[in-house]
Amino acid sequence: MSSVESSIPEAVAKSAAEARDRLNEHTLKIVHWHFSEETGSPFWLGKKSEFNFDPLKDIKSFDDLRKFPLFEDEWLRGGPINRWVPKGHAGKPVYVFETGGTTGIPKSRMVIEDHWKDYELFSDTLPDEYFPRGSNWLMLGPSGPRRLRLAVEHLAQHRGGICFCIDLDPRWVVKLIKKGWMEHLEEYKKHCIDQAITVLTAGHDVKCMFATPKLLESLGEALEDRGTSLQEIGIKGIFSGGTEFTPQWTRFCVEELLGGPVEEGGVFMTPTYGNTLMGLACSKPISADDGYKISYYAPQPRAVTEVVSFDDYNQVVGYGETGRVKLYTLTDEFFVPGFMERDEGEREAPFATYPWDGVSGVRPFHELASATTVGVY
Amino acid sequence: MITLQPLRWGKPYESIELKDVVHFDTGEPIAKFGTVGGGIVGRDMKKADKAREALLKYSCAELIEMSKKAADLFENAELPVGDSMQSVDQFVHQQSASTGLPEHMCRSNLKKNSFVLSNMDEILDCLTRGLDLSILSKGYGEEGRGVIVSYQAQTPILGAVLPNNSPGVHTLWLPAIPLQIGLALKPGSQEPWTPYRMVSAFIEAGVPAEAFGLYPGGHDAGGAIMAKTSRSMIFGSAQTVAQHAGNPKVQAHGPGWSKILIGDDVVDDWEMYLDMMVESVLSNSGRSCINCSGIWASRHTREIAQAIAERIGPVDVLPPTDENAQLAAFTVPAMATGTYAMVQQDLAESGVTDMTADYGEKLIEREHCAYLRPMVLHADSPDRGVAMKEYMFPFVSVVECPQAEMLRRIGPTLVGTVLTRDQNFSRAAAACVEIDRVNFGPIPTNRLNWLQPHEGNIIDFLFRSRAYQVADMPVAATTA
């Protein structure tokens, strides 16, 4: 047992064991759903024949998911999208959300209600004081076929508010960067921020918002140029994500953009980590005392994150050790039995709010970092 | 281990995002530097006026004196750099360790920067054509012919996105301080040493610290400097230069494609110029934009190429501490392999010959770095692709081209050394707009006269000459 493991309080260890039991049970249920002829999707039922094991008999716990080959997101490129719809959900309205697609065919994920459920769970983590129920929202992030856009709108509605959105095409942003059209990039950013300021100054009583770090930074700057600020304009709560999030940026955001920690500046900001495959991982509360460290915890058991060895993707690293982030999605809509994210980070211990493993210091996986365009909007 | 932290208008900022500076050969960390993102840079740029205000408290003459003192400190003193005191030897050792440049080349660049700083009065006198510098401070003044002249500062600060591998280029931003223009610098991740030491020397010499911003960081920080300053300079590839072409706010420095052009009247005596040609190609490990990448002549080109190859072909990798080391390492090995692959493509073209083929392997790969040994290629025509190439190691193509076509075919040429006594060819070369700095006579392309402008006059970049008319105000009627 490592020193970190031995330092986990007994109550947390007990909760963690219970959470693990629930995860094992949930895993069994989800595997049966996706691999039963009556309920499974054409994709997974087809894949089943390629396995040298029977998911219905041989998967007895979460750890058994390692028997599956790693999920390849390339499988999501191209159609027919319907092959991903579980038969058990036949006839229900289906959304499709895309990632990539600046050039070529994007990766598509079908969703029925997962994005609603994920954000309803996320809603429970938001403090009402700073995300007042009934207040309106601004979605300052990508539009188009993006999960985030509809999910944030649902979050606002779930909390009794109305969500205002802007037009932002991230694929055009990537093209501008690749072409080196930096002046156009700057103008496009201004165009997005102008839309946001128009909403915020139009008397809609917007108190909460989602923003990517870069857009939040630009919005704060633009408001200052107009002699006002996020606080003055009425914003109380922000959840941010969508692109890379570092402790240094968080510190800058809290100390310089938001006028200090929430007790002083009056604006609450929480980082999130997620993607179209997994959904949304929440952050442990951030503070200066903790060096603005950002630790994410997946919404277990619907999704799980592990930090695994760079050399063996089935081997979880020790607490505090560095590895690559591995994601699992275990909902009745979508099944991902282990996907190697393009990120790395450190494994974090369970704590009372999230009695399961987390991941901190998330950054682009070092072997892929140079080829990745991060933080494009 | 030394830690370098950002400087925000003179105030140190403790970033919590620290990156390693690693030794080029061992991969071991030798320093850490704290980084900032574009948000912090953007916020600081809003206060850029304060940097100029702080400098305007001193006259240009006073700042020139401080610059001279800074030159001495930079070259000779132990200075506070980051969280440590840094001696000259430590500076040289650290710079060599992270950039892969041999130590004697680091010392040479140190002296070059110091020389420019210590001769700032003469340099500014030449660049302004003798203008009373108080006119720049005040914005207008009487130049002596009974006419008011006005030079309006176009920016309170000069931004600069600095390179990783060329410690010599820092001379270009040094004149800003005595011109009372502040500096917002993004140091290169492998060469933070010169900007940090230079800023320390300036501050120790009495220049107000509020005039300096040092913003180590990624593309985000560099992008913010470029976007938020009215005048900036950037060092990069041909693509970087093309990206900023025509933008009056940006001075982009990239490949030089510097050349030596030999006239028909002297080409038969080419051996007289061999030392000059070798120095132009080999100095500073061929890394500079002022290194010669092309030698053009109408005849004897094979013999010229052969003679240069005999001189630089045997040059081999030596330890960076060796006084005879001529080659700098590629700290990113993939750059060396990629460059070598491009040279192989050049060689695949008919009419292109590797004159250094007999001198052994060119690509020397190590665990954490790589080297490219000197190469001399002969091209039988300016139509060959290699005639327009420049690489970051001692590399030159010797191109056979009729004199009558030469000036029409050379393409962009940062430094053009023209060897001729032919008045017509001289006049044509002087008029050729492809050549920026022109040398007539056997002047190696790497030897710059600092009293002359380089890639545009920094005075014209930072100040705008404009009309400034003044008439006495009539006396107002007395009111009861």
Image (cartoon, rainbow, N blue to C red):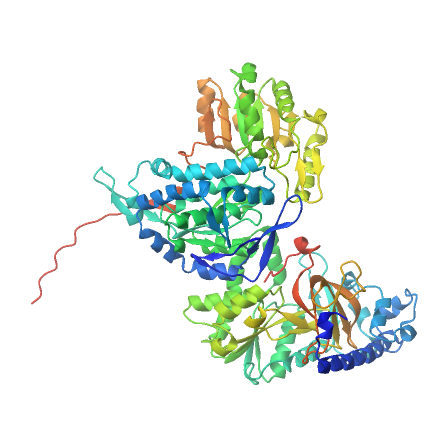
Residue B337: x %, y % from top left:
70, 40
- Asked if B313 appears above or below A37 in the picture, the reply is above
- Asked if B167 appears above or below A59 in the picture, the reply is above
Q: Is residue A26 left or right of residue B226?
A: right
Quarter occupied by the C terminus of chain B: bottom left
Q: Nearer the viewer, residue B365 or B141?
A: B365
Whether residue B382 is visible, yes or no, is: no
How many marks do you count on the picture? 0
Whether residue B6 is visible, yes or no, is: yes
Residue A260: x %, y % from top left:
49, 72
Q: Nearer the viewer, residue B339 or B465?
A: B339
Which residue shows up at 64% across the image and 36% down it? Answer: B319
- Asked if B57 appears above or below A70 in the picture, the reply is above
Q: Is residue B26 left or right of residue A161?
A: right
Which residue shows up at 52% across the image and 68% down it? Answer: A253
Residue B176: x %, y % from top left:
40, 46
Which residue shows up at 51% across the image and 35% down it? Answer: B108
Residue A65: x %, y % from top left:
84, 70
- Asked if B74 appears above or below B350 in the picture, the reply is below
Q: Nearer the viewer, residue B463 or A128?
A: A128
Q: Nearer the viewer, residue B276 or A337?
A: B276
- Name the image quarter holding residue A170: bottom right
